[in-house]
Image (cartoon, grey):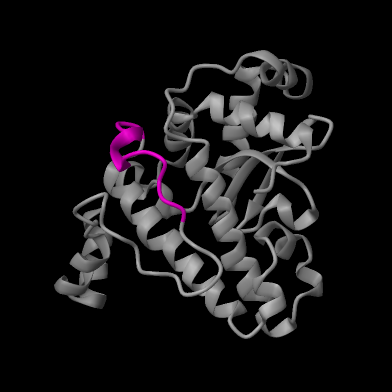
């Protein structure tokens, strides 16, 4: 880590490096206003709610800077395209092939980033444990039970080359499956729906775990809010789950 910091200091200078790693001082600090139809959703819990598994500084930077940037860039992409700006993000992503070529990549990267992160904040903030009821039955039926799901999910996340995501998808009948995607791609781009997912971009874990992505993947299960995930599962079966 010290060698990495030395190289970055040489490249950017001490002041610039400090600005990269400095976190917002307070949870109430507002993110830059997004000018357009898409907005940064507030964290549904304090940034330290996921400690010790995900540190508050990572949460603040990840939400207030990375996600905020996706929203700002998404709004910039649609500012001259009123019809697209009026569409829900899941519809934009499902119809990427129909989007104007000049903004298609921006919509893919930033729209995917916005959708993925909105889901991500929503399934965390819990205490881990295990699901119950219909969701637990579906995990056993389709994914071999919670222990196997965790092992397979963590393995898929560890195998993502570079940056990306690992997901559990859900269809309208409640059937579950594992999927991984590069960058900010999402099953929404194939018309699917996401039950839950974990971000394996380095910015999601590097301050605490450095290059130990498998340790981060394993620890992440301790902050899953299974009640929120169960609500997403019910919404998927009811046809009302969006992102």
Task: Give residue 45's quadrant in the image.
Answer: top left
Q: Residue at x 67, y 82 (%)?
A: 81
Report x, y in % for residue 10.
21, 74
Q: Residue at x 59, y 30 (%)?
A: 229
Task: Give residue 23's quadrant in the image.
Answer: bottom left
Main SS category, magenta section: loop
Foreground: 152 or 35?
Answer: 35
Q: How many labels does the image show?
A: 0
Q: Which residues lie in the magenta part?
A: 41-53
Report x, y in % for residue 138.
74, 21
Answer above or below: position of 59 versus 221.
below
Report x, y in % for residue 106.
61, 74
Q: Which residue is drawn at 67% across and 79% down?
A: 82
The answer to whether one can see residue 151 in this image is no
Tell whether position 49 is magenta.
yes
Report x, y in % for residue 206.
36, 49
């Amino acid at each position: 880590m010290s060698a990495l910091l030395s190289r970055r200091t040489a490249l950017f200078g001490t002041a610039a490096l400090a600005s990269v790693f400095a976190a917002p001082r307070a949870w109430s600090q507002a993110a830059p206003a997004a000018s357009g139809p898409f907005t940064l959703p507030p964290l549904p819990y304090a940034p330290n709610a996921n400690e010790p598994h995900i540190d508050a500084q990572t949460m603040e930077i990840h939400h207030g800077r990375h996600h905020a940037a996706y929203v700002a860039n998404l709004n910039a992409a649609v500012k001259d395209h009123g019809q697209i700006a009026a569409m829900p993000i899941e519809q934009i992503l499902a119809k990427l092939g129909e989007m104007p070529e000049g903004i298609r990549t921006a919509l893919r990267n930033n729209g995917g980033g916005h959708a993925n992160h909105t889901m991500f904040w929503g399934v965390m903030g819990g205490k881990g444990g295990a699901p119950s009821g219909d969701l637990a039955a579906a995990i056993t039926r389709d994914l071999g039970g919670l222990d196997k799901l965790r092992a397979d999910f963590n393995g898929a996340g560890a195998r993502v080359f570079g940056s990306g995501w690992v997901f559990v998808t859900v269809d309208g009948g409640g059937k579950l499956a594992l999927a991984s995607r590069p960058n900010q791609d999402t099953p929404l781009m194939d018309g699917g729906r996401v039950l839950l997912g974990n971000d394996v971009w380095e910015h999601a874990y590097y301050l605490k775990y450095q290059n130990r992505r498998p340790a981060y993947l394993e620890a992440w299960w301790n902050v899953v809010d299974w009640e929120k995930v169960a609500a997403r599962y019910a919404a998927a079966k009811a046809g009302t789950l969006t992102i």
